[in-house]
Image (cartoon, rainbow, N blue to C red):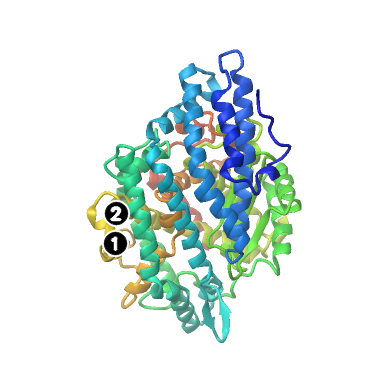
């Protein structure tokens, strides 16, 4: 007898594993052959959509308020009790489908992923993933509780960002030191979390037959179209192409600021000492203006964003107790996305919202694919959706288009976007090279060796354009500040690969805006039904790891920056 699904994901809101398990058991034992496989697959997809939506909402609620005990319990229930056991059952169902010999053209990449995940699965890893989830919850709580004293006012470290844009250099320096102070003071606490995560990850890799977590992670992320060696080629290309470009940009900044040397608190301020950009008065206005910007890119995008706003699926402002970072998640049953971020009324908020909105539009565009398993293409393409939206939206952020800024301010913001796009590659290469190193060497378990390696890699990719004298503790704190190391290991090279894809979409838009947007949408609508190179091709781009391909795009960005300066 087939177990009927509940009417909505709300049924799983307070579910325990005992409530969820019968649905998996039904799908695992129900008679299955080629005559009923589509019905079975639809039931599995609908069930997973409900469960994933309940889990996403629980994570969202906890991220919005890490001090709420009930939300913490729900997050832990999904993360440490339900999700690891559900992964085990998914492998069981994947095996049924693969062994049946099921095939159809739009499911080829899905079946390949299923086969890959089956090969990786180890029952011994189920409790290890549960423990990792508990550690992640504890880490997020520790970060969410961090505060600093700013002139007698309790503030979060992220609320120091606006002061990094102040023209008074002494204010910037004080804000910079304050921002990293809790991370410096709690370095050992954060290192304790990371050490335990590191040990669990290395054991997970060994249980699945891999020598180290790096090799496991590349397989687990379904990286069929590039290898760790390609990542090393990417690092070398950044060192060869971007580091000199970054040096040119930072030399210009130093000259405009009339400072020598350039210090890390000089990197966010306007180089011509103009007032700090504040794009909105409050979050409601931020949302309203963003709708108009998206309408200029593509009218449907405005409708998508309005649906999220009306459904209460935007939590944008920073506050005490809120988890760090920003993300977009999907509610697959209702085919809606949600956006979480920490806005503090600075220009960087604009980039963050446009970025996460790009992810949300991807959710909408891929929603018509029949099965949940087909909709997510992997981070390398998902980040093309988000980073392209930053660049495609950039011409419309002025008030003439309903945006945040007057004409001069919009030019500043657009220039900042392109400059930080170029400078980003040095950070991306540092993050990936750091993880490649730490998970493939015994020294990766040594917290002091990790900190030394981080400094070495920053010197390799950034050079000496910025003077970090007497700031080793703050420079080291930068990697503790990065959530990906703790929560999403090896999720970072995707940003670099995708940024090169997004720059190609932007390049195409300079000569044919409508055509570029059309191809962008067509690529997003494919979800994960095509291999990665074909998704990039559909968007009008290609995968790039080499210096020549990177140089073409960096040169174009520098030319555009020169035009904006003029």
User: SS of the residue at dot 1?
Assistant: helix
Residue in view at x 42 percent, y 67 percent = 252
Q: Label 1: which residue?
A: 450
User: SS of the residue at dot 2?
Assistant: helix
Q: How many marks?
A: 2
Q: Quadrant of the N terminus?
A: top right
Q: How many C-alpha atoms fall within 10 Å of the one at disc 1: few (<14), some, or many (≥20)?
A: many
Q: Label 2: which residue?
A: 438
Q: In which image quadrant can residue 281 be found?
A: bottom right
Residue 266 visible? The answer is yes
Residue 259 horizontal side relative to residue 340, left or right? left
Residue in view at x 66 percent, y 32 percent = 368
Tell me residue 26's x, y (percent).
Answer: 59, 28
Disc 2 vs disc 1: Cβ atoms closer than 8 Å?
yes
Q: In which image quadrant can residue 243 be found?
A: bottom left
Looking at the picture, tell me which residue is in the foreground, 134 or 429.
134
Tell me residue 80's x, y (percent).
Answer: 50, 50
């Amino acid at each position: 007898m087939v177990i009927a699904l509940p009417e909505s994901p709300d049924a799983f809101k307070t579910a325990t594993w005992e409530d969820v398990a019968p649905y998996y058991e039904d799908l695992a034992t129900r008679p299955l052959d080629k005559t009923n496989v589509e019905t079975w697959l639809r039931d599995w997809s609908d069930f997973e959509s409900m469960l994933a939506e309940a889990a996403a909402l629980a994570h969202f609620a906890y991220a919005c308020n890490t001090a709420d005990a009930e939300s913490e319990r729900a997050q832990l229930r999904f993360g440490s009790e339900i999700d690891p056991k559900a992964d085990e059952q998914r492998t069981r169902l994947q095996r049924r489908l693969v062994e049946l010999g099921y095939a159809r053209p739009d499911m080829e990449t899905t079946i390949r992923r299923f086969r890959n995940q089956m090969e990786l699965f180890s029952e011994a890893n189920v409790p290890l993933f549960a423990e990792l989830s508990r550690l992640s919850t504890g880490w997020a709580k520790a970060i969410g509780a961090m505060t600093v004293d700013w002139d007698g006012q309790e503030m979060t470290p992220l609320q120091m960002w606006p002061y990094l844009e102040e023209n008074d250099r002494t204010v910037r320096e004080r804000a910079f030191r304050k921002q990293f102070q809790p991370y410096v003071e709690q370095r050992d606490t954060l290192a304790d979390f990371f050490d335990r995560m590191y040990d669990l990850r290395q054991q997970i890799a060994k249980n699945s037959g891999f020598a180290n977590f790096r090799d496991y992670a590349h397989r687990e992320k379904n990286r069929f179209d590039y290898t760790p060696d390609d990542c090393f080629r990417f690092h070398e290309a950044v060192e060869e192409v971007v580091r000199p470009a970054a040096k040119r940009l930072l030399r210009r900044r130093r000259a405009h600021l009339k400072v020598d040397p350039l210090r890390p608190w000089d990197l966010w301020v306007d180089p011509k000492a103009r007032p700090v950009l504040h794009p909105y008065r409050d979050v409601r206005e931020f949302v309203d203006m963003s709708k108009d910007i998206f309408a200029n890119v593509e009218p449907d995008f405005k409708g998508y964003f309005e649906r999220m706003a009306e459904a209460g699926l935007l939590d944008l402002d920073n506050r005490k107790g809120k988890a760090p970072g920003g993300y977009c998640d999907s509610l697959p049953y209702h085919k809606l996305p949600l956006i979480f971020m920490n806005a503090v009324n600075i220009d960087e908020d604009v980039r963050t919202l446009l970025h996460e909105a790009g992810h949300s539009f991807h959710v909408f565009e891929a929603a018509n694919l029949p099965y949940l398993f087909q909709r997510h293409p992997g981070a390398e393409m998902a980040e093309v959706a988000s980073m392209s939206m930053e660049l495609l939206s950039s011409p419309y952020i002025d008030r003439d288009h309903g945006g945040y800024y007057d004409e001069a301010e919009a030019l500043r913001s657009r220039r900042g976007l392109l400059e930080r796009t170029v400078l980003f590659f040095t950070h991306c290469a540092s993050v990936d090279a750091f993880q490649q190193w730490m998970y493939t060497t015994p020294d990766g378990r040594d917290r002091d060796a990790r900190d030394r390696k981080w400094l070495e890699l920053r010197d390799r990719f950034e050079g000496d354009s910025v003077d970090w004298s007497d700031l080793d503790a703050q420079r080291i704190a930068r990697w503790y500040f990065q959530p990906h190391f703790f929560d999403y290991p090896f999720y970072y090279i995707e940003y670099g690969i995708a940024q090169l894809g997004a720059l190609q979409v932007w390049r195409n838009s300079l000569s044919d805006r409508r055509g570029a947007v059309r191809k962008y949408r067509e690529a997003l609508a494919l979800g994960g039904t095509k291999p990665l190179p074909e998704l990039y091709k559909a968007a009008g781009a290609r995968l790039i790891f080499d210096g020549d391909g990177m140089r073409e795009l960096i040169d174009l960005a520098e030319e555009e920056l020169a035009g904006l300066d003029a």
